[in-house]
Image: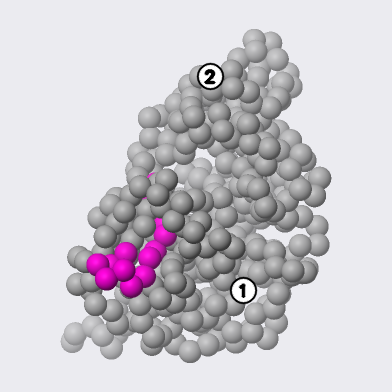
Amino acid sequence: MNPVITPAAPADIAELRQLYYAVYGPHYPVALGSDPAEMARLIADPDSLWLVGRCAATGALTASAAIHGEAGSRIGRLEGIAVHPEHRSSGLAAALTGALCAAMSDTGRLDSVYATVRTVSAGPQRVVARNGFRPLGILPNAVDIGSRESLALYARHSPGVLDRRVPVTEVPAPLLPLLRASETALGIAYPGVRAGADPLRAPGASVDRGASARLELIEAPAFVARRFRERFPGGEGWFYPLHTPNVLLTPEDGGFEVYAYLNRAGGYCSLLSAHPDPASAAAHLEPVTRALARAGAGYVEALVPLAHHEALSAFLAQGFVAGALYPAMRADGDGFHDYAVLSRSTERIDFRGVAVEPPLQPYLDCYVSAWASTHLPTPSEVAP
C-alpha cells in the first residue's frame, strides 16, 4: 500500500522525535530530530521542505526526510532520512527523497542538493543514487552516533550546472587523484590541470605549537553569529552553506579570529571563515585544531575553493586530507566554483565496518592513499 506523503506540520513534532529515537536511539546529533524549537523553525522555513510519510491504513508516522535551504542560496541539503524499523525495505526513503527532489530541485529552485550518507550499510547510498545523486567523496570519522561513523558525500546537480564550472589550472599534487575519481564518477573533466608546489613546503607549515595554549574558544552562539555578520556583511571569505558559526577562536593578542560551527553531540566541527582574511589564520591551523579537539571535536573539516592553491596547501601541510570534491558548488556570476572538503580526525580511523557501493570505492581508495602519504613515515624517515 502506497504511503501518504505530506509536508511536516508543527503537530507532528512529538511523533517525529519518537521516530528519530526509534531509528537512531538517544545519540542522534542533528537538531532536526531532537530539538523541538529547531524542528518548528525548519517546518516553517519557506526555503526548506520537510516531508513525512504515514501508513495509509493506520495513519501512523513511519518516515521523514527534508531538504534544508537558506535565503539567498541555491544549494540545499538532504537530511534527516529516517524510516521506522518496522517499515524498512518498503521504498519509503526513496519515495520521500524523490518527492523532495521533485519539489525543490526539478523545479529549478536549487542548483544542487547534497547529502551526507551513513556507510554502516549500503542502503542509504542506494536510496540517494536511485534519485540522481552521485558520489563526491568520503568523510572519515565525520560524526559520533554512539560510536564514530564515516559518511559519504553525495550530490545532485540541476541540468547544465556542471557545464558552467570555472576552470582551474593548478592544484596541490595530492589532490590530483581526487580529481581523476571525480571525473570518472561525474563524467566531468579537468583538462590541463597541473600539480603545483609541494604543499608540505607551503608557507605556514611550521607553527608555534605552544600557541594552542593561548587560544581562547568563545562558545556563545548569539554573540558569535552577530560578530560574524559584522565581520562579513557581504558573505566574503570562506564559504560554507547552511552552517551558522557558534564558536570563535582567537589568540590573546586578537591577531585573528576563526569562526566555526561546533556540534558537541556529534563530536565534529566545521571551520567557516577567518578574520581579517583566511590567510591570517592559515599558519595557526594546528593550534586551532588542537583547541577544537579539547572542546570535543574529534573531526574537523573545511570547505576550500579548488582554485585557492595556497589555502589548500596550508591545510594539507597541517595534516588535513582531502576526501571529497564538490564540483560547481558555489555560483559566481555566470559560472560555478568547485570546492574541496578537507578533514582531520584526532581519533583512529577504521574502515573495516564501512559498506561502500562500487561508485564510491575510488574515493575511499584515494583517501586511504592520501592519508598514508600524509601520516605514515617514508622509508627514508624510518630509523634503520
Please tell me in which quadrant of the rendered image residue 90 appears.
Answer: top right
Q: Residue furthest top?
A: 58
Looking at the rendering, the stretch of residues picked out in magenta corresponds to 250-263
Q: Is residue 310 visible?
A: yes
Between residues 129 and 274, which one lies in front from this camera angle?
274
- Left or right of residue 121, residue 70 in this image: right
Report x, y in % for residue 262: 39, 50
Report the Cα–Cα distance between label 1 and label 2. Answer: 45 Å
**Nearest-to-viewer mark from 1 and 2:** 2
Residue at 51% in and 19% down: 14
- Residue at (43% x, 35% y) in the render: 28
Relative to 291, say whether 378 is above or below: below
Q: Main secondary structure of the magenta part?
A: strand
Residue type at numbered disc 1: Arg
Q: Which mark is residue 123?
A: none
Of the pair 104 and 319, the residue shown nearer to us: 104
Judged from this view, the residue extending furthest toward the front is 230
In the picture of the structure, the residue carrying the numbered disc 1 is 180
> Mark 1 vs mark 2: which is more N-terminal?
2
**Relative horizontal placement of residue 316, taking residue 65 as reference (left or right):** left
At horizontal 57% and vertical 55% (from top left) the residue drawn is 241
**SS for tag 1?**
helix
Residue type at mark 2: give it: Glu
- For the question of whether residue 212 can be seen, the reply is no
Across and down, in percent, residue 116 comes to 54, 49
Tell me, for residue 15, which label it has, or none: 2
Residue 307 x, y percent position in the rendering: 59, 77
Q: Nearer the viewer, residue 85 or 107?
A: 107
Query: Image quarter for residue 376?
Result: bottom left
Left or right relative to 340: residue 106: right
